[in-house]
């Protein structure tokens, strides 16, 4: 059985004291669900160490929103996966904002993913098409290219957990989530690609998340889809009550599917 996963991507929000207060506030409300759902907070790099410290004895996981492809060297402004290894659980790779606003290429993302795995980090790999690509019926082509390129050379038996987040760019921060049926269809294709790129067993064990305008209002219908193993949440992860409700509904979907 795949474990469900909910990740909160804080993007570039909160000062260090604000982020620490938020993590302290949300921790007791999230912990009761950690048995049923993997919960990951993705704070900005500057406060990651402090927040990992606050969550040291908690089942809540922490992850970086980005990391470079070398372990060390002359890379001003970058953080390396070696710096994260041993205390940070996850790293998000390939978010569309990194691709679009910071020009990250498929080749660079493959190197970043490989470097994260080499350092024993678990990975959330984000893929997704733009509105223009979606309207031109190029979703399958774009997602196939992004996924195949990112996973190039990855050994099927690599011990780290690699989760895939399908985030259609047109659904991010727009209030216009993909329909659960659209998301499920693309995710089914992603699972087929994973079987080819890694192995059928690995594909079956890989959590595939949906991201893009996830709210307490639409989480229930998303989690009814068989291929959706959780969500990557942006805006709603900055509101404690909303994020807790999303995690709670995700945990409830486990109970529903077993009952
Ligand atoms: P929103 O939930 O704000 O649409 O953001 C999604 C996202 O980009 C998460 O990584």
Image (cartoon, helix red, strand yellow):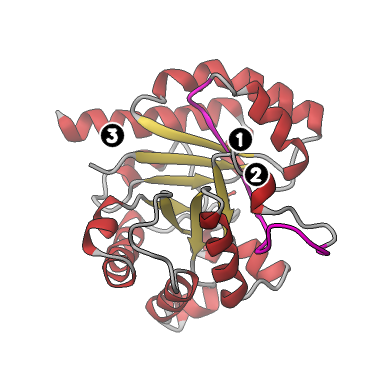
Is 209 in the magenta? no
Whether residue 236 is situated above or below residue 173 in the rendered picture: above
| Quadrant in the picture for residue 192 | bottom left
Q: Nearer the viewer, residue 242 or 141?
A: 141
On residue 87, which mark appears? 1
Q: Which residue is mark 2?
A: 84
Which residue is at 49% across, 53% downward?
124
For numbered disc 2, what is the local secondary structure? helix
User: In this figure, which residue is indicated by the disc labeled 3?
Assistant: 253
77 or 223, which lies in front?
77
Q: x, y (%) of residue 246? A: 45, 34
Q: Secondary structure at mark 1?
A: loop
Earlier sequence position, callout 3 versus callout 2: 2
Q: Is residue 248 left or right of residue 173?
A: left
Q: CA distance from mark 1 to mark 2?
A: 6 Å
12 relative position to 9: left or right: right
């Amino acid at each position: 059985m795949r474990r469900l996963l909910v990740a909160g991507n804080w993007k570039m929000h909160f000062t260090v004291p604000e982020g620490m207060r938020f993590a302290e506030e949300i921790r007791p409300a999230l912990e009761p669900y950690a048995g049923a759902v993997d919960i990951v907070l993705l704070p900005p790099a500057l406060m990651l160490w402090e927040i990992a410290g606050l969550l040291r004895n908690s089942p809540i996981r922490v992850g970086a929103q980005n990391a470079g492809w070398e372990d060390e060297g002359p890379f001003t402004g970058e953080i390396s996966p070696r710096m994260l290894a041993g205390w940070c659980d996850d790293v998000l790779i390939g978010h569309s904002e990194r691709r679009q606003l910071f020009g990250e290429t498929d080749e660079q993302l493959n190197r970043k993913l490989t470097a994260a795995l080499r350092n024993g980090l678990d990975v959330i790999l984000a893929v997704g098409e733009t509105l223009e690509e979606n309207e031109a019926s190029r979703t399958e082509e774009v997602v196939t290219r992004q996924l195949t390129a990112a996973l190039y050379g990855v050994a099927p038996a690599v011990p780290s957990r690699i989760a895939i987040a399908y985030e259609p760019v047109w659904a991010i921060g727009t209030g216009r989530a993909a329909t659960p049926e659209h998301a499920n269809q693309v995710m089914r294709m992603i699972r087929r690609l994973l079987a080819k790129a890694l192995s059928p067993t690995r594909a079956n064990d890989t959590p595939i998340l949906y991201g893009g305008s996830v709210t307490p209002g639409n989480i229930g219908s998303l989690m009814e889809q068989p291929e959706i193993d959780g969500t990557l949440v942006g805006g709603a992860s900055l509101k404690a009550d909303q994020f807790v409700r999303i995690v709670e509904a995700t945990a409830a979907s486990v109970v529903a599917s077993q009952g």
